[in-house]
Amino acid sequence: MKSLPLFALLSLLALGACGGSSNNTTPPPPQSCSPQAPTSAVAPPSLADWCQVSIQNGDVALKSGVLPYDLTTPLFSDNALKRRTMWLPPGTSASYASDDVFSFPDGTVFTKSFGFRDDLRKPNPVVTWIETRVEWKVAGQWYALSYTWNVGATEAVANPAGDVRNISFIDETGASVTAHYLVPSQSQCGQCHQQNTYVTLGTRARYLNKDYPYSTGTANQLTHLTAMGWLTGAPADPANAPRLPVASDPTSGTVEERARAYLDANCGFCHNPVGNARTTGLTLWASESDPFHYGVCKVPVAAGGGSGGLQYDVVPGQPDQSIIPYRMNSNVPAVAMPQIGRSVVDHAGLQLVRDWITGLSGTCP
């Protein structure tokens, strides 16, 4: 997420927007509104002013004209539940790209809401909504800001300074977990989104090429966006577009395909030729075809203590001797990977990567 100019941040501070989550549980008066294309880098102090989403009956509710979407394999964020939306100004469309992020028009607005379930074993858990992030494009530039929800999720206010929330829940095994969930500041957003220029991470064909249960019926997202007029240039048949398997679904691909999809979604935003970790030479996009470049028998460039004394990023057949799973299994700031966005270990993702490494053949020098 790109930092706002100084005048924009000062405007937010003047409006009292950086005070974090409000404790006022009195619902705001009903508002009748329609989404409007933003024309300024200055964000409104309240999420309601965007007229994109609200929380109704414990879940995210969309305003008229706002479209939900999802990703094949999403980023792990401390087991947070996520709801994603997009809105394009009338008469505009995005341009499809097979290997790059889609090009969206000025006035586009994305939201992503994060909530925590009280018990991951429950079919209908109670969800506590923490924040909704908004990304918007004006004059060719993307801007972003987090809005944090008050108790009761009746109002969300701008929080450019970010926050850390201690969230407790029961995981799939019945264990009690406490996450130190990060609401990112505007400067922290750039650690993931800055790739030469600011990019919207999930808007690639390989993430969006999947079915979604729309209110009008289940349809492929690329096909649906094209039918709406919101996307041009996509293949008529989604089978001709890139697609990542669902990392958590054994029926969607091999162990290797799913493990590399997981690393793409959770590490590839930095570990790519234009990302913040490009100088490491480790490319974790699933499209990378050279085993050395995605870590097999590769000596890290500058892992330091983060390597745990191990020699290679990936040692075929030996996950315990491989740096990637070692760092995935740590919560120590100087060791843990990804460096931002999680405070607990994703045990399912870690096991998938370990299984992939175990199945690799060969030896390192």
Image (cartoon, rainbow, N blue to C red):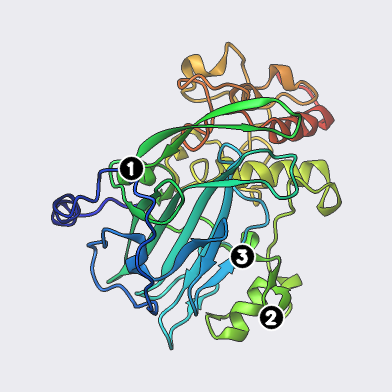
Local SS, label 3: helix
Query: Of the residues tagged 3 and 1, which is closer to the observer?
Result: 1
For the residues labelled 3 and 1, the Cα–Cα distance comes to 28 Å
Mark 1, other Cα within 10 Å: few <14 / some 14–19 / many ≥20: some
Q: What label does residue 185 carry, if any?
A: 1
Local SS, label 2: loop
* Residue at 49%, 56% in the rendered image: 112
Mark 2 or mark 1, which is nearer the start of the sequence? 1
> Looking at this view, is 127 or 37 the one in front?
127
Local SS, label 1: loop
Look at label 1 and name its amino acid.
Ser
Mark 2, other Cα within 10 Å: few <14 / some 14–19 / many ≥20: few
Q: Number of numbered discs present?
A: 3
Q: Which residue is mark 3?
A: 205
* Residue at 77%, 22% in the rendered image: 363
The picture places residue 51, in percent across and down from the top left corner, at 39, 71
Quick check: can you spot residue 97?
no
Left or right of 185? Residue 307 is right
Work out whether 239 lies above or below 112. below
The picture places residue 351, in percent across and down from the top left corner, at 75, 30
The picture places residue 292, in percent across and down from the top left corner, at 65, 35
Quadrant assignment for the C terminus: top right
The picture places residue 37, in percent across and down from the top left corner, at 34, 77
Look at label 3 and name its amino acid.
Ala
Q: Which residue is mark 2?
A: 216
Mark 3, other Cα within 10 Å: few <14 / some 14–19 / many ≥20: many
Left or right of 161? Residue 119 is right
Query: Of the residues tagged 1 and 2, which is closer to the observer?
Result: 2
Q: What label does residue 167 carry, if any?
A: none
Contact (CB < 8 A) between labels 1 and 2?
no
For the residues labelled 1 and 2, the Cα–Cα distance comes to 37 Å
Look at label 2 and name its amino acid.
Thr
